[in-house]
Amino acid sequence: MKRSLSGIFAALLIATNAYSADLAPAEPIPEQPPEVTVSEATGWYLRGDVGYAFTDLRGARYFQGSNATEVDFDRADLDDAWTVGGGVGYQINSYLRTDLTFDYLTQADFKGSTSGQCGFPLVDCTSSDRSSLTAYTLLANAYVDLGTYGYVTPYVGAGIGGSYVKWKNLRNVACADDGSFCDDEVTHGGKGNWRFTYALM
């Protein structure tokens, strides 16, 4: 009898386990995501740029009188200015691209002053000098994209080229320090030339 009860109990356990297993919901088979094929990004592109230039005037000199002696301004300041530009480029692959850009630096005003003597008889005077510059820059650039994270693609790049810097006429007025008089305004012709330019990005 003891052996029969043990057998019945074992049979009940097996049946119960089987019954319980049948009640559990079947686990869903995970679906495999569809295979996505990403082709490399290549081709021509256009770009447009708007920026703000924080100018750094590293000294300014002028010719003193009719001689060829250059003298530093006592005070010189060049205002910041906006830049606008555009370019055309080519995406070589998903990581490498290159472009040619043309940018224009809007008018940056220059203000300076010098001290000396003027009038007759000679008295101490301070000259107030005004001018402005604009610049056109042509650069050939290359970039390495460091991957895309969401909507952001960090990159490093460099470019070389040239800038045509154009100084407009320089106007100056000398006034006596005691405020007794001012000379007539004198205008000196401006000048422009090309300069080597590079960029690190």
Image: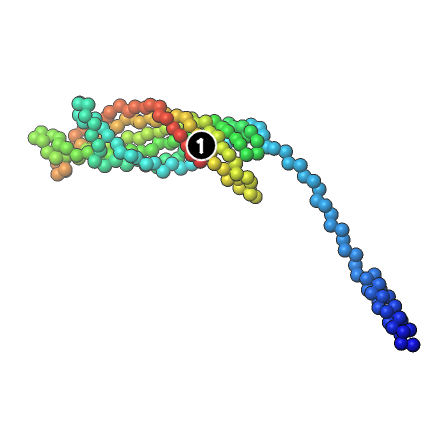
Residue at (26% x, 32% y) in the render: 60
Circle 1 sits on which residue? 158
Asked whether residue 111 appears in the rendered view, the answer is no
Mark 1: few/some/many CA within 10 Å (<14, 14-19, 20+): some
Reply above or below: 95 against 193: below
Q: Position of residue 157 (x, y in %)?
A: 46, 34
Work out whether residue 176 or residue 156 is closer to the camera in this orientation and state it.
156
Q: Is residue 72 left or right of residue 25?
A: left
Q: Quadrant of residue 85?
A: top left
The N terminus: image quadrant: bottom right
Reply above or below: 178 against 13: above
The C terminus: image quadrant: top left
Residue at (19% x, 23% y) in the render: 68
Residue at (55% x, 29% y) in the render: 92
Work out whether residue 136 or residue 198 is closer to the camera in this orientation and state it.
198
Reply above or below: 3 against 193: below
Residue projecting furthest to the bottom: 1
Secondary structure at numbered mark 1: strand
Residue at (26% x, 23% y) in the render: 189
Residue projecting furthest to the left: 121
| Amino acid type of the residue tagged 1 in the rendering | Ala
